[in-house]
Amino acid sequence: MTRPLLRLLHHARGHRRTVRLATLCSVVNKIWDLAPPLLIGAAVDVVVEQHDSLLARLGIADPSDQLLVLAAATLLVWGAESLFEYFYAVLWRNLAQTVQHELRLDAYDHVQQLEMGFFDERSTGGLMAVLNDDVNQLERFLDGGANELIQVATTVVVIGAIFFYAAPTVAVFAILPMPFVLMGSFSFQARITQRYALVRDRVARLNARLSENLAGIATIKSFTAEARETEAVRADSQAYLEANRDAIRLSSAFTPLIRMVIVCGFVATLVLGGRMALDGSMAVGTYSVLVFMTQRLLWPLTRLGNTFDLYQRAMASTARVLDLLDTEVRIRDGDGTLPPHVKGALRFDQVDFAYVEGHPVLHGIDLHVPAGTTLGIVGPTGSGKSTLVSLLLRFHDPSSGRITLDGQSLDSVPLAELRAAVGLVSQRTWLFPGSVTANLAYGRPGADADDVARAARAAEAHDFVEALPHGYASEVGERGQRLSGGQAQRLAIARALVKDPPVLVLDEATSAVDNETEAAIQRALEHITRDRTTLIIAHRLSTVRGADRIVLLDQGRIAESGTHEDLVAAGGAYARLWAVQTGERYQGGVVPSARVPGSTHT
């Protein structure tokens, strides 16, 4: 698991100065923390030796004065230890929060740059587990585990030096357990790594299940599937529980085993040092220091299990976050630019596309949409209508062929410029929690109230917005749940109009609304499509009847193309669909009439 640590250090290289300073404070704090046993040994030396003590040899003859000096030294030591504990706590904890904050933002920003195909393959809950829980695991380690490792290392070095200076023979036996502790720690690390990787995988699955179920709660209730979904959550939660139990069984065994190894070193110091003090080869004060120091040296090693446990959790999570950051961005900005005033002329030039290689969705699409005109796109489900929109917005790139806007190939211009020039109203209306105004101005945050109201009027949304409890300041709720489907759809159209794009795409914008709302949207279309290039994708042919040109897609190919009247007169697939939707009888290529579908035939 050193590789995730090295990757993390590389990613956080901008904080090296803080890491060094925090490490220095941890080391200095531990040095001051190890001073009290020396003071205790000196105090024992004063009481036993009195005028022959170490302090006496340093010039402080009176034992009472020696004790006062030790008292002053104690206050100094404890004050310095406390001060540097404050420093390292502030530095490490702020570093943890900062790295966590930056890593989460970097990961989220990177996710936003990924193509839509990435999201088709990953669950929302799984991504949430990475962006939230995995990042938090790293914060927990930096908050305490890093300092713990540094202080253990400092303890080993400082006390080891004191031991070998004071009593080399005892030092050998005191430090003898340490290689076994380290070997046990590394063995534990290797064994626990895979277990925590499995834990992270299980929690991601559980989060995905919970996220999907909460998003689909209405469907669950309508099919009375609550018990079934509870059982599915129980199974995923049980898998997470079992993965944790497996990791806990191993991690919990580490500290007791290491403790029994460590006690051998403590016993050796107690017995060997005691004999040396009894035969006069070691001062009683020195023996006291060694006994206390042995405890200070060895007992902290028992916490290595918990620290390594925290470290492994953090590295398993770090690997997942950094793997996400390493995911290649396939849809990249071009180095060109669109004209200052985009007219909106579109061309699809022999465009092929497949979501999965070997299973093409579009075949040789050749389309020209002059600037300022309206193109209707119809066809059965799965014919590739919405895929055209995805390619226009560069959610995906064509497998072959190219798409141009005002003569510029889409892959040659920055994504921000392209998407600023295209307004999308999707059949899946998504409103964000917040006010009506905030949602309408989402594509142009600087829009003033007049711009917002003007767009709402054009989308025939102004009247119902004014009727809301707080008008344009009314909250729409999560995903716009406080509004009807038709109201949300009209707000989505108004939101696109506030953006005022030269190209407007309506992807099944009337698919989920009633006839009255459809009629309102139809009236709005007469105004909002004026002087802008508009692509209208629809199942309801009445929605595209007034388009300058209509194309019918079938199995990813353009099967028919022309005006509504031409297509009806041709008596082909479009005419058959028109007959079905109007309730007219289709008779041998002749459609009796071409009236707009009425309220009873939708």
Image: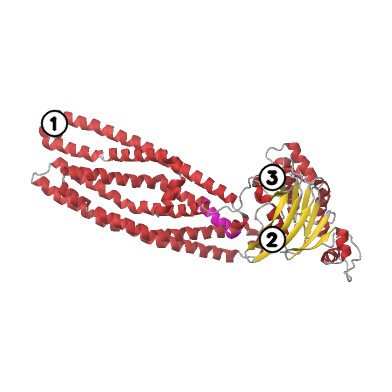
Task: Identify the amino acid type marked 1.
Answer: Ala
CB atoms at circles 2 and 3 under 8 Å apart? no
Q: Position of residue 226 (x, y in %)?
A: 60, 63
Residue for badge 1: 56
Image colouring: secondary structure
Does the magenta stretch mainly form a helix, a strand or a loop? helix
Q: Residue 420: which numbered mark, if any? A: 3
When asked about the image quadrant of residue 75, the answer is top left
Separation of residues labelled 2 and 3 (CA atoms): 25 Å
Within-10-Å neighbours for mark 3: few <14, some 14–19, many 20+: some
Quadrant of residue 577 within the rendered picture: bottom right
Of the numbered discs 2 and 3, the one sitting upstream in the chain is 2
The residue carrying mark 2 is 352
Measured as percent of width and height from the top left, residue 158 is found at 25, 43
Disc 3 is placed on an element classified as helix
Query: For the C terminus, which image quadrant?
Result: bottom right
Residue 411 percent coordinates (x, y): 66, 50
Q: Earlier in the sequence, mark 3 or mark 1?
A: 1
Query: Bounds of the magenta span?
Result: 120-131
- Give the side of residue 579 with respect to residue 84, left or right: right
The answer for how far apart the CA atoms under marks 3 and 1 are is 83 Å
In the rendered image, residue 125 lying in the magenta stretch gets the answer: yes
Q: Residue furthest bottom?
A: 588
